[in-house]
Image (cartoon, helix red, strand yellow):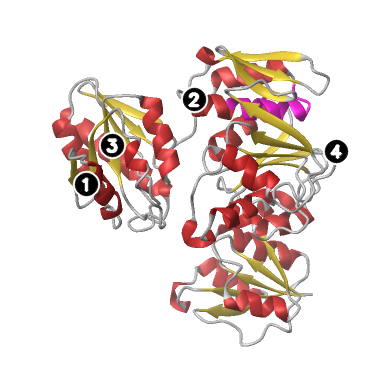
Amino acid sequence: MKAIIIGLGKSGKCAMYALQDLGYELAIQDSKDPEKAEPEVAEFCKKHNITEYYGTMPDDFTGFDMMVLSPGVDPEKDFVQKAREQGVEIVGELELAFRLAKGNFVAITGTNGKTTTTSLVGEIFKASGRKTNVVGNIGLPVISVAQESTEEDWMVTEVSSFQLQTVSTFRPRVSAILNLTPDHMNRHHTMEAYAEAKSAIWWYQTPEDYLILNADDETLLKLCLHDIPRELKAKLVLFSRKIEPEFGAYLKGDDLMFKDEQGEVHHIINRNELIVPGDHNVENALAAAAICYLCGISMEVIRETLAQFKGVEHRLEFVDELEGVRYYNDSKGTNTDASIIAIRALKENIILIAGGDAKMQDFSDYVTHLQGVKHILLFGRDAYMIKEPLDKIGFKDYTEHKDLEECVRYGRSIAKPGDKILLSPACASWDMYPRFEKRGEHFKEIVQKIKDEID
């Protein structure tokens, strides 16, 4: 068997190692220049006689049985279509890992909240004593642990729309789509195409499996369930802050509840016992509790873990309080809906830092959700895309800055005790940082620098 791996990020390298172990004859391709190839990859390729294509592409793909695409590579690219027409099977790292793994899969997707929910589910699984791997879009490639997995393993997997574009057999025991709002329009172009990619999470499930959906998200229900020309075979489970479903998790007053398949009602936790703030974290907790209960974990373990969970880094993360001003890192707020959620959670007295790579989003609706925001600090390549709709609605309390540090320092100069300086960019980081994590880390470093100066 012969395979070509397109893209040598973390998942691509792990796929290369796994397929080499399986005896595949390999080729690799990456857009970077040959001199920028990682030494460990170059050495591995030389040792195993792997053909390398850097900055170029094979003229013909007829000799390959499989093409493994990095999630960052659009499967609609001409060369992918060419390979498909020449009989090459197109798979992604997630699909490949699923084929190699012996463990059980839980899969979580959605525009927002999937990292927090995946982390929370992982913590509950670990607390229950399950052999747990928290993998996928959250950082650790699924394939890095797939080959060593056993039937006792659980793969708690955050999956993105990019990963789901290249699945063909992927079947999680429990899947969840948390919400659906415009994102990655530069890749998917339409909400219908974006929703189709997300809905692939349930396409290969069986009547033994469960699909969990947000009952309060009408767009999600319409585009990912009703408008998809596929039969849903899995059992449908809902979660909601607004209604009580026949089967699922819901909010009753301040209490999170779960109604099982037999109609029996179980108390999960009171929302005031949750450490993480905001209605969105209530939704994350409802989804996580439903996932874990359906996987056979006791409500006692679920409740105890929910009460101890402090959230995840870069997602409305409290950084520090300096001179009576609180600093929050929400660098993972890479789209308008995520930023709105963070703003609503902090409610008032917010000095907002926004801007970056806009991913072709429309900010005209976003700027109408700034109640509680006193001032906006704009930075990054596409800051003008936020500035223009702000001007249209007459919002004048904003300033433009050259970089993140200038934003933070200016924010400090105008902040008063009780204010909150919030980095929630509503944009990707790629114009200035390689990943949103790096942007968040830089924000925290700047806050620490200011703290050292004060001391």
Q: Earlier in the sequence, mark 2 or mark 1?
A: 2
As drawn, the residue found furthest toward the bottom would be 59
Depth order, front residue of 114/361: 361
Disc 3 marks which residue? 352
In which image quadrant can residue 444 be found? top left
Where does the C terminus fall, quadrant-wise? top left
In which image quadrant can residue 282 be found? top right
Q: Earlier in the sequence, mark 4 or mark 2?
A: 4
Q: Which mark is residue 208?
A: 4
Residue interval drawn in magenta: 285-297
Say above or below: 169 vs 150: below
Residue 158 visible? The answer is no
Compared across the picture, whether 284 is left or right of 408 comes to: right
Structural distance between the alpha carbons of marks 3 and 1: 16 Å
Q: Amino acid at mark 4?
A: Glu
Disc 2 marks which residue? 279
Q: Earlier in the sequence, mark 3 or mark 1?
A: 3
Compared across the picture, whether 345 is left or right of 413 comes to: right
Q: Position of residue 17 (x, y in %)?
A: 67, 63
Say above or below: 214 vs 98: above
Residue 295 visible? The answer is yes
Structural distance between the alpha carbons of marks 1 and 4: 53 Å
The dominant secondary structure in magenta is helix
Q: Position of residue 123 (x, y in %)?
A: 62, 29
Q: Amino acid at mark 3?
A: Leu
Disc 1 marks which residue? 391
